[in-house]
Image (tube, rainbow, N blue to C red):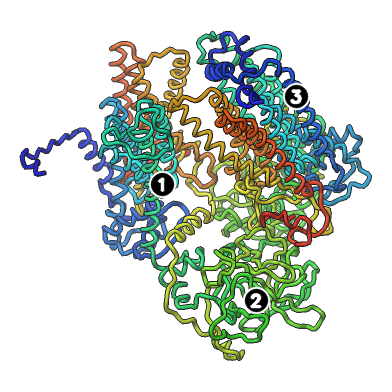
Amino acid sequence: MPSAVCGGLAGSELRHRRGRGGPQAARAAVPEEAAEAAAQSPKRPAPGSRPSEGACRWVLLALVTLLAFATRFHRLDQPPHVCWDETHFGKMGSYYINRTFFFDVHPPLGKMLIGLAGYLSGYDGTFMFQKPGDRYEHHNYMGMRGFCAFLGSLLIPFAYLTVLELSKSLPAALLSAALLTFDTGCLTLSQYILLDPILMFFIMAAMLSMVKYNSCADRPFSAPWWFWLSLTGINLAGAIGVKFVGLFIILHVGWNTVSDLWHLFGDLSLSLVTVGKHLTARILCLIVLPLALYTAIYAVHFAVLNHSGPGDGFFSSAFQARLSGNTLHNASVPEYLAFGSVITVKNLRMAIGYLHSHRHLYPEGIGARQQQVTTYLHKDYNNLWIIKKQNTDSDPLDPSFPVEFVQHGDIIRLEHKETSRNLHSHYHEAPLTRKHYQVTGYGINGTGDSNDFWRIEVINRKFGNRIKVLRSRIRFIHLVTGCVLGSSGKALPKWGWEQLEVTCSPYLKETLNSIWNVEDHINPKLPNISLDVLQPSFPEILLESHMVMIRGNNGLKPKDNEFTSKPWHWPINYQGLRFSGVNDTDFRVYLLGNPVVWWLNLLSIALYLLSGSIIAVAVQRGVHLPAEVEGLSQVLLRGGGQLFLGWALHYFPFFLMGRVLYFHHYFPAMLFSSMLTGILWDSLLRLCACGLAASSLASGVHMGGVLSLLLGTAYSFYLFHPLAYGMVGPLAQDPRSPMAGLRWLESWDF
Amino acid sequence: MLGFLQRPIVVTADVNLNVVALTAAGLLSRLWRLAYPRAVVFDEVYYGQYLSFYMKRVFFLDGSGPPFGHMLLALGGYLGGFDGNFLWNRIGAEYSSNVPVWSLRLLPALAGALSVPMAYQILWELRFSHCAAMGAALLMLIENALVTQARLMLLESLLIFFNLLAVLSYLKFSNAQHRPFSPGWWLWLTLTGVACSCAVGIKYMGVFTYLLVLAVAAVHTWQLVGDRALSHVGGLPRGAGRAGVGGQGQEGTGVCVLGHVVARAVALLVIPAATYLLFFYVHLTLLCRSGPHDQIMSSAFQASLEGGLARITQGQPLEVAFGSQVTLKSASGKPVPCWLHSHPSTYPLSYEDGRGSSHQQQVTCYPFKDVNNWWIVKDPGRHQLEVSSPPRPVRHGDVVQLVHGMTSRRLNTHDVAAPLNPHAQEVSCYIDYNISMPAQSLWRLDIVNRESDAEIWKTILSEVRLVHVNTSAVLKLSGAHLPDWGFRQLEVVGEKLSRGSHESTVWTVEEHRYGRSQEQKERELELHSPTHADISRNLSFMARFSELQWRMLTVRSDDSEHKYSSTPLDWVTLDTSIAYWLHPRTSAQIHLLGNVVIWASAGLATALYALLFCWYLLRRRRRVCELPEDSWLRWVLAGALCAGGWAANYLPFFLMEKTLFLYHYLPALTFQILLLPVVLQHISEHLCRSQLHRSLFGALVVAWYSAACYVFNVLRPLTYGDTSLSPSDLQALHWKESWDILIRKH
């Protein structure tokens, strides 16, 4: 069937577009011409072949979907213990079921869906998910894994449909689907309770619906057009709701939309009103709708999680007041700070935490060897301080003394309640921020020296000279050196338990780092007053949780002397991730891409750049191409260009990121790269076939090429499938292992 | 041939007095009392130390930028006859009499002065009027921040000079398109490439302007590729030649697309790369002596410097043989460079956390030279500890034992948790306690940078890993400091699950000699005696370049907060200033402060340009072209270079995590100043509808410029620091709360 090779590619689809296109058709002039030329070429497809091709397409889709589900659900229950990051995301799913508040650096949608899947499948949220390797025993974990595997399986039909839409070529679509089906990496990543399958599902769904609505461009404002457009928006909200990586697909869609609008705007046959309608439709569906959904996700998140839990300390005092079980919930505390009160002091900058001290000393060589003072995000007895007068050692809680309130400008001492040491600073450099002074705990039983004196100051005084709990923004000025107490926000090394550094900064610039508020306040001599003021509005909560997440993400810095994955490792499949098991007796699962697929993808990107630039130069030089080559090069430049853009957008930004990176961050990019591979090889083989036009070899070259690629990937999957489905026995570096011959790179350690 | 004799020799000089006047004014403003103050001003203290290193030809490593800028400053010192003897330790310190202050500051000042006429030239080449071009130059002339920065021994004015030179020569080149491949065309094209690489060579920041010029050149080239009037290759008619087929063009019609593309690629990609390498070549040639930063570099690099390690390693045998005495240095410089070490103390029986140890002799990594760093490479099959004759070299894959020189115990590792990293194995020197814990002291040699599998272990050059034969653990520096029982030396462990080859598992032989004595006493004597010397071993230039460049990019400068540091957002509104210098007695002081009028109007002009550009673009898309084609193209090119130059030199700072200062903004500001007259001329030509409007607008511009001059004059004492101001005068200059004007309290 030589007709399918060249002519049938773009002809039939574009032809009916012209019929209905009306005035809009003009802007699609170039492919239109090509299509017409293709249709007029002698190798026009026989009219009878169209219904059968349509049927063929559906049969293949069903087949591809079936195979995807079969591979993803095969041995889904293995291993029956917690694998890798299941310990986080499974745990967070449980939090939703238990409605306890937690903090995570990713937006909530993915974990909410996991929680929902668990809830619906009868998981009761009682499993602890403490560490990888814990057995699930009787707990029902299959619902959550099944949900993830379901979404992971859908990636493949999505890829199939996307490529089909972009290239109008069944072999290309089939090839892309096969690459993804037979990739051990995608398979492994889809089989566990992780955010990645959910994220990739939304990314691919957004891509598919964008491509679909692009192909409806000739029928604007029709029902399918609206459907796909709004579906794109919904999927964008889903993608960014799972992980911030979803931003890249938003950029992709945004770029596509802008260039689309630019074309419409330049089309003089459209009135400005029509262009305005187009613009409004896109703003509605691609900006307003996703924003609304994204906000709704958070509304649900906050509504569901209304119990105090492990994440409280990351948030401001006001935020905590809305969590039942938290000490600030319906709190009643003494209103004004008095001498002798026991308090906790919280930094106003988000995600810094409480002023904290503990019995450990600063190590030798780092300032004076005195007790460490840090900030700590969790609630703890070591966060309690007693506020005392400068020089009196008399017990202020003695009932014979009158209550004396702390005033703005008073000289005070802060005594750590557990260790009875005073907050102290001196002219030694701070451990990390060398230009600041060190802050320590000093003195015995509250007796120290003049370096323990601090002047307490209220910023923007609103409540007179007294200091109000929770509401007053205060800072502490060290009397002797004149520096201001603050937290640099940098994590101390292991000796400081990775808590955050506290310094005394000689630069009196007013930053949030050096402003504090009093949170807990215990003073038996004062009456407790109920505080009703602390109900933050929803926008405030939303903003705060984003600030905390961003800080959390920035805080995930690689530590020294740690082997970290670098973005350049990823496309070459340099190193995998251990999902489960280390030793030869364990059940081991190793996340590693199928090297045949990945290296083919890598080669394809290089080939694509080469062939793409050759075609672009040829077009720019005005070289006259034969009609079928013209059609193929359009597919390569436009369809391939879309996918290439997707790959680049999901890959290159990682080079700029300072946070810890892992191998699995590459998988969204890998999806795009596999689709590109499908289109590229199909087009290249067709071009070869066109080169041999006359001979009977032509169709043979194409079919043979595609078939051998399909079989090759399938065979490599057969070789590498133990990586995903689990293996027991000696490690691969042992020559007795069945996997020994497959350790093609020394850096693979399965 | 002698045709020139038949006609008189005529020189036609075409002197643009505007340019001459601007140059003179620029020189006057930048060079006036250049040697004042005769004290270290701000970052001179930083660049000065490197200057001294150049004068003394001592090797140094500065992570802040490539060496070309430092070398230019050093050239000033060389011309002034500076001997490098000055202690650069404090801002404000008086220069001693041997420091030629004037010539040290001369080159930056000249660069700053020449930027003024170059601004004129750029606007002129952009096809704007003489008036606009004069305006641009005059604005450059009275910008206080540029004056301050140019008058001191700092790099920004040099960077700005080369940025402008790159843009100017590219414009000259693209305006010479009607005579392609003429000498002038080649000159300007090459100069573009050279100026770009000079800018990059001064500060990495120069890359932004380089990329901008490349982008503009790429767009122009792409348009050229689309020019169907040019042939593909050589002089062949269109269609006959195929792209990719190489061929020499016919004489006369040799204008072909391939030629254009190749010429640009060579001039804008190859030449800059070569020039950049040249900077490093000169740098490494100049700095041939060892110095304080040696330790960061690899042993091989250190050995290529005079003195230091080279003195020790000269004349060592190259090939390590069985019986060799060696010191092993860890390739990882983190946390400090150190050597594999052992001493007679043993691991404590049990650690603080209750775990037990093998109680065998400690093996550590020690950051100082010590006789206990010596190890002997022993053939496991033989007892001899001296080198046989002829020496039997050790090759990749050989199994060896390492015997500690002073204690004669063998390097050993076993299945006991290491003291600080319990997941790794303890490494010890084996003591036979007779407790059924056999010695496991066989190590397989793995040369990481080998070229063949039979490669011989070489001193300094070979990077080796030692893989334990029994457990396949790799000898690794963990980087942790041992507690008091280990004398705070660094922990060495056997890493079982090693992933790839990390620096911390790699070791090199630094000192090496063939052992001659069998007796332990003699051997100890031998170990204490220094190694002998003769030949030196040279690393190729490319190897030294790549190592130096890599270290420069990865060296960690502690990102300390600075009193005068600021954020990019502060720069546009000039919400920050830097106090550069304060007279030790009076209140004369130098500040980096911009001309507020220019900063504000330049910001406005940029915003206006962006708005107008978008407006025109949208209108043109709907086929409404109110601008003639040529003035539209001129407007776009000016925007691409000036507004683009501003954006390219400014926006990347938002992504940077290092400490930033106001002076980082100056290159971007320069481009913004160039944009200002562009916008003004455009308004006057296209937006003022009548002659009356135009005259009014002209008057406004003159008034505005006078205001700028006035501000320049008011801020002049802070720019030049030549007059002592009274506290009330200073208070009057305190226009913004955030400016750090220093007022003495008496």
Q: Is residue A637 above or below residue B434?
A: above
**What's the mark number on residue B200?**
1
Q: Secondary structure at mark 2?
A: strand
Query: Picture coordinates of residue B134 (x, y %)?
Result: 27, 30
In the drawing, does residue A472 fall left or right of residue B707? right
Q: Position of residue B482 (x, y in %)?
A: 67, 69
Which residue in the protein does label 3 denote? Answer: A56
Q: Residues within 10 Å of mark 2 (few under 14, many from 20)?
A: many
Look at the image and tell me in which quarter the C terminus of chain A lies.
bottom right
Q: Residue B132 sits in which quadrant?
A: top left
Q: Secondary structure at mark 1?
A: helix
Q: Residue at x 74, y 33 (%)?
A: A156
The chain to which mark 1 is attached is: B
Residue tagged by mark 2? Answer: B400
Marks 1/3 same chain: no
- Residue A179, relative to residue A741: is it above or below? above
Q: Chain of mark 2?
A: B
What is the three-letter code of the residue carrying label 3? Answer: Cys
Task: Give the CA separation, mark 1 to mark 3.
Answer: 59 Å
Circle 1: residue type: Val
Quadrant containing the N terminus of chain A is top right
Coordinates of residue A594 in the picture (x, y in percent): 71, 45
Closer to the chain start, of discs 1 and 2, is 1
Mark nearer the viewer, 1 or 3: 3
